[in-house]
Amino acid sequence: GNPPLNYIHGEKHVVGSKMVNVPKQRKTICKRCKRHTLHKVQQYKKGKDSKVVQGKRRYDRKQRGYGGQTKPVFHKKAKTTKKIVLRMECSQCKLKKHKPLKRCKHFELGGDKKRKVSLSIVSFSTIFDMSL
């Protein structure tokens, strides 16, 4: 059958309002080294917009002078989350690659791992001894 919706290439990522925790280093394939190497993991951030690209020059020219706003301004924002993109850098050859994850509200990089808490059952005899 088909894998569950929150299952991507052997890795489980929790979808929705739960926390996604990713380690700061991971071993994964490097295309240049052609083998699994240790990669440094960071969250991808968008760079500063360039002022000299054609679209920006055209927009600025059109906005000049009188006439107000010339292009539509987007107001109907529907999404409450963004897709998380991991930026991984090979520790050997410094090759960088991006890996998109699913949408999530809370993302953590290198946080504490969740451990299953084992409840140690205290015997009744120790409780009674303490009460005496």
Image (cartoon, helix red, strand yellow):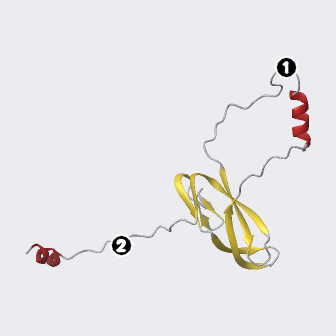
Tell me what residue is drawn at x 88 percent, y 23 percent: 65
Question: According to the image, label 1 marks what residue?
Answer: 67
In the picture, measured across the screen, residue 53 lies left or right of residue 15, that is right
Q: Residues within 10 Å of mark 1 (few under 14, many from 20)?
A: few
Q: Nearer the viewer, residue 42 or 17?
A: 42
Tell me which amino acid carries mark 2: Ser
Which residue is at a point 23% across and 75% down the rendered structure image?
A: 122
Q: Is residue 10 above or below residue 5?
A: below
Is residue 41 positioned above or below 5 on the image? Answer: below
> How many numbered circles are shown?
2
Give me the residue at 20% from left, 77% from top. 123
Viewer-closest of 131 and 60: 60
- Numbered badge on residue 118: 2
Give SS at disc 2.
loop
Residue 3 — which label? none
Residue lying at 91% horizontally and 31% vertically, measured from the top left: 61
Describe the element under mark 1 as helix, strand or loop: loop
Residue 130 appears in the rendering: yes
Q: Position of residue 84 (x, y in %)?
A: 66, 55
Q: Is residue 3 left or right of residue 38?
A: left
